[in-house]
Every structure is written in C-alpha cells, then in structure tokens.
Image (cartoon, helix red, strand yellow):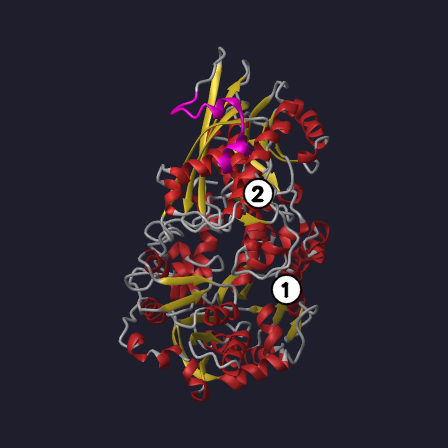
Amino acid sequence: MKYIDEFRNPEVASALLKEIEKVATEPIHIMEICGGHTHAIFRSGIDQVLPPQVSFIHGPGCPVCVTPMGKINQIINLARRPKTIIATYGDMLRVPGTESTLLKEKAKGANVRMVYSSLDALKLAMDHPDHEVVFFAIGFETTIPPNGFSVLKARQSGIKNFSILSNHVLVPPVIQFLLNDPEVKIDAFLGPGHVSTVVGSQDYEFIPRDYGHPVVISGFEPNDILQSVLMILRQRQEGRCEVEVQYKRVVQHQGNEKAQAVIDTIFERVDQEWRGIGVIPGSGMGIRASFREYDAEHKFADWVSHVETSEPETCICGPITKGVKQPWDCPSFGKACTPEHPIGTCMVSSEGTCSAYYRYQYIRKIVGE
Amino acid sequence: MQNQDWKGSVQLSHGNGGRLTHELISQLFMPRFKNTMLESLMDSTLFEVNKGRLAVSTDGFVVNPYFFPGGNIGDLAINGTVNDLLMSGATPLYLTVSFILEEGLPFEHLVTIAESMASATKSAQVQLIAGDTKVVEHGSADGLFITTTGIGSVPDGVNWNPQEVKPGDQIIVSGTIGDHGASVLASRYEMDFDSNIVSDTCHLRDLVLAVRDLPGIRCMRDPTRGGLATTLYELAQASQLNYRIYEKQVPIAESVRGLCEVLGLDPLYVANEGKLVAVVSKEVAETVLTRFQQLEAGKNARIIGEITEELKGWPTLVTPLGASRILDLLSVEQLPRIC
C-alpha cells in the first residue's frame, strides 16, 4: 500500500492547486459520477481547497443510494422466509424499506450475514446445504463480473441453494438520462475509475461526441482527483473535448474483456428503476433465462412479488442523486433524517451525498463556523 | 496442571456449585491465579487500605473470535481493566474476575485463556483476589464472556482530568493505531485475508509510571472501542475545547492502513488495546515523548496535534491538503464485538 503515498503527497497537491488556480478562469460545474469520488472529495477536503469557480455536482454513482424501495422490501421479505440466509454488504443492512430494515429483521431472528463479496455468500451456501442463501447483489459494472462469476461457479459445482437478488445498474445509460434532462446543468465529468477498469474508457465517448462535455476518468486519491480537475480545465482552455484517462495505472481503453464476457454470459440488459429518478430503459443487468434458477426473483416469486414500492414522501433523494438539489434543500436533512435514523438511501451509505454532507459539513454549519 | 490434563469441554454441571465446579476452580483456575488472598476462598476477600484515594473500574469482554493474532480474550480482560485504572493515574493493585462460560467450551481453550490471564496479571503487577464462574446452556453465549473489576491507588497530587486541559496543550499518542481492531477483523471467519497484523493488547503501566511524576500531564485515555477519533471526541466534549490533530502525524502501520483501505474502514475509528492518548502542557511535551519512546510500548509515540479554542467541543483533523474536517462520533459500529 506504500505506493499510495505518492498520490497523497501534499507538495504535489499544492503544485496541482496552483496550476488549477491559473486555469480556472470561469465557473465550471463538474459532476463526479462515482460515490467513491464523493467520499474522497469530502474526506480529504478537496472541496475546501479548490478555487470557488470549480464546483462539484454529486452524481448517481452510489449503488446503495439508487436501489429502489421495492427491491429493499423484496429482500426484507426474503429475510422472513424460513431456513433462508441473506448475505449482503454492510451498508445494505440499514437501508430503510417501507416498514423495516435488514438490521431490524436480524434483531428479530432473521439469518442475515454481512459479506464482502458474492463468493463469501457462495461459501455460506456450501457450508449450509439445508438453507437457501440469497445474495443481495447491488452495484455497478465493477461488481457485476464477480457476482456473475459466483453464479457460474455455483452451476459448475452443482450448488442449488444459492441465488442472487439482482439490482445491477450501469453508468452510461444514467449519464445519458441526466444529460437529456433540462434541469441538470453539468459542464464536465469526473469519470468513475473502478467501473472503467471493467468497461474501459470507450463507453464514455458519446459524452464529448454527442453532448460536448469533457470526461476525465479519475483515481480515488486526493492528487488523482486534483490532477483530473486540472485535465478537465486544460481541455476547456485548449478547446478540446474528449475522454481522457488520469487513472492510467489501472484503466485501459477497451476495459477488461474477460470480465465483460462473464457479464454477457449471465446477464442481459433490462429496464431498471433508480431510486427517486424512475425507470431508465436498458440501465440494468438482469439474469438471463438460461440462469434463472439462480435468480431469487424467479426462484422465490411468491415472496418477492406484491411488495410496496412507493418512496417516502419527505425524502428528496431523487433530485439530490441527479445533482439538481442539495441536501440543504431537503426539509428532513439533519432533522428527521440523520445517519442514525436515515429516511433516504443517500443518508445510509458513506458514499451517499447526504451522508457526506452530514459528516463533513452539517456539524460545522450548526456550530456556526 | 498442564493443558493435556484438561480434555473435553465445559458442562452445565461445572457451574452448579457441586463437585465439578470445585474441580474447575481448584484445579484449573487456582493453580494459575495462585496468591494468598485468593486462596482464602471466602465469600469476600479482605485487604488493607492506605490513606488517600482509590480508583475503581469495571469492564465486560465479549470479543469474537476469542483467539485473535496477538492475544485472546483473557489478555484483553486483564489489560483492559488495568489500563482503565492507569488512565486516571492510579497504580493498579487488585482485580476480580467473573466468567460466563458456554456449555461446550473446550477446556484446552479455557486453559490457554487462563494462562494468558495469569501472565498478564504478573506483567501488570496486579493480583487477582476474587472470582466467580457461571455456565450457561449451549447457544446462550458465544464461547465465554469475561468481566473484570479493578482497584488501584492514586498518589496525592495526581489529578488527571479533561477539565484541566488548556489551549496550546499537546496531544500525544503512544504508538500505531487500529492494530487491535484490524487484527480481530482479519481473523473473523468471514475474511480470508493473509495479513501479519497482530493485536496491540498490552498494559500501559510502564508508559504511565514513566511520566506520572511530571507536572503538566492534563489527562490520559486509552482509545479502545471507537478508536482514536471517538476518544478525541469524548475528550473535546469534556474539555469544551478543540482537539486538532494532523492526519500526516498519526502513526498507522502500513498493513493496518492497507486492510482499512480494502474494507472501507477509517483507521481513526478502529479499536486499540495497548495505546494511550495523553494531553500534556507544551512545556513537558518533548520530555513525555522522549520517555515514551525509550520504552518498547511507546517506541512509535508521536505528538499528533494540539488544543485550540476554535471549534470548542469538537475534534478536527487537518488533512494532508491542509483542509480540516470534524471527527464526529460514528453512527454505526464499524465492527461489532472487538473487545
């Protein structure tokens, strides 16, 4: 992990900031798509040290935040099924459904396990042959290949008590959706580093070509982000508009073809609901019919259909996820909705905009600094 | 009595007060914790008290798993309470211990844990003077839970308290942070990490006694559950001052930082079991640091920040970019059952 220091070196950072100051002559609104970037920007205080002309709009790239209410209610229902183990990432435990959370179900006796990957969930299935194990598979292009791989491995090993409740979402369709929305004002994009390791930089070429906005695919360390901002500003200064890769140590133009092949084998494009935004055509990845026995929605249809799908009325997660409103605009933010008692998904994940604002700005504001 | 003499596992009848209970106490625990005060086996133990102030502290231990790299629940149960006494400037004297054992706990595990406890008490120079053992049905506990209570004596003139903290005081941490929490995390059954992270569990007696004579020690805390950030939060609230630390100055082992990066944890919130935070006057800060660094337990000690009047009641972290952010309490447990 030592190499990381290079990307946190304060001298490099101050040199980059000086360059940014020189080039940032006019206001620019940069959307960071990925929740990992949102978290990194606040955590290292990049928003505090950039010149005021440069502002960030926080995009829809937090997988927890975009998971719709109906899906949460489905997994909560499945947690109530006898002899069923729910395996999920830690953040999903606290995401509120209509009247419960996985954490509350766990306290009542449901078998809910926190895992770090779908392969951990597959191991649970092997270790508990008398239980059904359902992995709550949420995430972007980065997590779809390993989730697909666990399905492949389950079939190869003849494991029948494993399935996934899929809520896989794709970055390019949601970006296109936002760019077609007249409310959304974006001048440039900080492209998602991890997602791009899978899909490559080619998937973003429509943004400069069709919409005229620069894209720089960025790493996650403070100096990565500063350098990417500088690259965006330089494109504008030099009259260029293209997809550039700052995160060259990881991202290749064509992405990871093996991972893409796994995705294509197991999954197919589906219309996908995004929390607070609505259904975006072709923006999700559902399990193909040929792998249906691993699809929890198919396997346990009795338990997951007929769930409540409406969103809480007081929450403005949708417009916040689109970047057209800020947490300050929400009447619940910091009052009814806090990290301890979240109403909306954006307050749950550390990558969510509301959670980041609460942790890094709200207290400072209320103590009057 | 050696390990191989204890085969099999704990049964409910080891807790019913009958023959097996007596056997457990007289043959497993007593030979290891032997001292004249414990040997009386009365309902209570008597000891002499000198004039002056006593410190008392109690703590329950439920760590899962109870063996982890660098130690076990027994080490924690002794060091945890000893350290709590030390943080008020007390010399730890006596401990009591209460075991809740789960039916089915392998005896060889209990022997290992008891031996760790015996050597930890010896190392910390305290005596175990009273104890209790209960057994609960299989499924009603998770191996074993241990509660210890400690008593120590506080020398005259030692009044360590966060309310004594003043602007300009320096914040010192005695070594790398997050080691204990990271070691437990890495050894949890869900994880398959190859790591060389070991818990830092140890007593802080040498560190505290090395500087207790100095004027200008304002207060000390051991940053256990909730880690360094939580301790600073509690201190800042108690002092009603700003505790400002510099991210670059905080010592974190590479391996711990790496594990935290991978898992998305903030090492500032990860537990320690053998570290202390001291707030001291500017005049004695260098002396305290030097004395810490001369000891094995304090070789990585650093001054990590200072007290200011800016954001009263809050700790802040200055990032390498020079930005500052507030260190709030965590909303959810990063990792349950680490101590």
Query: Where is residue A79 drawn, in percent x and y?
Result: 34, 67
The quarter holding residue A24 reads bottom right
Asked where in the image residue B86 lies, by quadrant, the reply is top right
SS type, badge 1: loop
Q: Is residue A313 above or below residue B275?
A: below
In the image, is residue B33 part of the stretch drawn in magenta?
A: yes
Percent position (x, y) of residue B45? 43, 22
Report the span colored magenta.
B27-45
For residue A256, above or below residue A358: below
Q: Reply above or below: B207 against A51.
A: above
Q: Which amino acid type is marked by label 2?
A: Leu
Farthest residue in the bottom direction?
A: A290
Residue tagged 2: B317
Q: Residues within 10 Å of mark 2 (few under 14, many from 20)?
A: many
Quick one: SS at disc 2? strand
Q: CA distance from mark 2 to mark 1?
A: 23 Å
Residue A243 numbered mark, or none? none
Residue at the outermost top position: B51
Could you tell me residue A81's position as x and y percent?
A: 31, 69
What is the x, y in percent for residue A231?
A: 67, 66
Query: Residue B87 is drawn in which quadrant?
Result: top right
Query: Is residue A326 one of those drawn in magenta?
Result: no
Residue at horizontal 52%, vertical 22%?
B36
